[in-house]
Amino acid sequence: MSLDSAQSQRGAAPAGAGPMAQVMGRRWMVSVGHPLAAQAAARILEAGGNAIDAGVAAGFMLGVVHPDMVSFAGVAPILVHQLFEMIGQIHQRLGTAVLLVEQNVNEALRMTAEVYVLEEGRVVFQGASGEKDQIVRHLWRLTQDERASAGN
């Protein structure tokens, strides 16, 4: 088994994609965006595991070495970030109003000028997105109310 250096892979990678790590055996090959992820997959294959086992091992390792781009929870954080950036561009370039319903309070506040907090279809808070402390207090109160009612 040999671990190809990133330098030898630069010619094969698309422009701007960066280096790619490859690990090869006599009967298999792994190509992943990080050398440790390639190594994790290679160890699984060397031990007799199949391609699915190796892919899962590589994915878990990518979650460790690239937590900003890979998430065990399902959606990669980088995709969420890119989605928010696209929504912001639509608003800025087209001047289009955007209705954003989102549970990620920090990202939502970064994207908006005005905020409405709803509880069971009723507006319980309305204000500027800069009033983050008040918004978070309202959301915290709603969460505490839900917990209290669930305990009854």
Image (cartoon, rainbow, N blue to C red):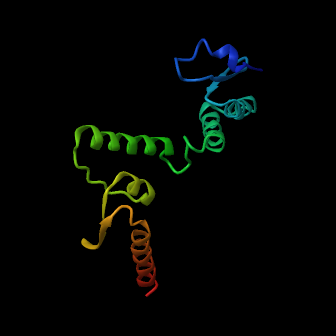
Q: Is residue 146 visible?
A: yes
Which residue is more in the foreground, 36 or 140? 140
Q: Position of residue 44 (x, y in %)?
A: 71, 34
> For this view, does 140 lie left or right of residue 112?
right
Which residue is more in the foreground, 105 or 4? 105
The quarter of the image holding the N terminus is: top right
Q: Position of residue 93 (x, y in %)?
A: 27, 37
Rendered residue at 63%/22% (across/down):
19
Rendered residue at 44%/45% (across/down):
80
Residue 149, by quadrant, is bottom left
Residue 82, by quadrant, is top left
Residue 21, by quadrant, is top right
Number of numbered callouts drawn: 0
Q: Is residue 117 visible?
A: no
Q: Position of residue 42 (x, y in %)?
A: 71, 29
Q: Is residue 32 above or below residue 108?
A: above
Q: Is residue 92 above or below residue 101?
A: above
Q: Is residue 12 above or below residue 79?
A: above
Rendered residue at 60%/11% (across/down):
11
Q: Position of residue 6 (x, y in %)?
A: 69, 20
Rendered residue at 43%/74% (across/down):
137
> For this view, does 93 lie left or right of residue 59?
left
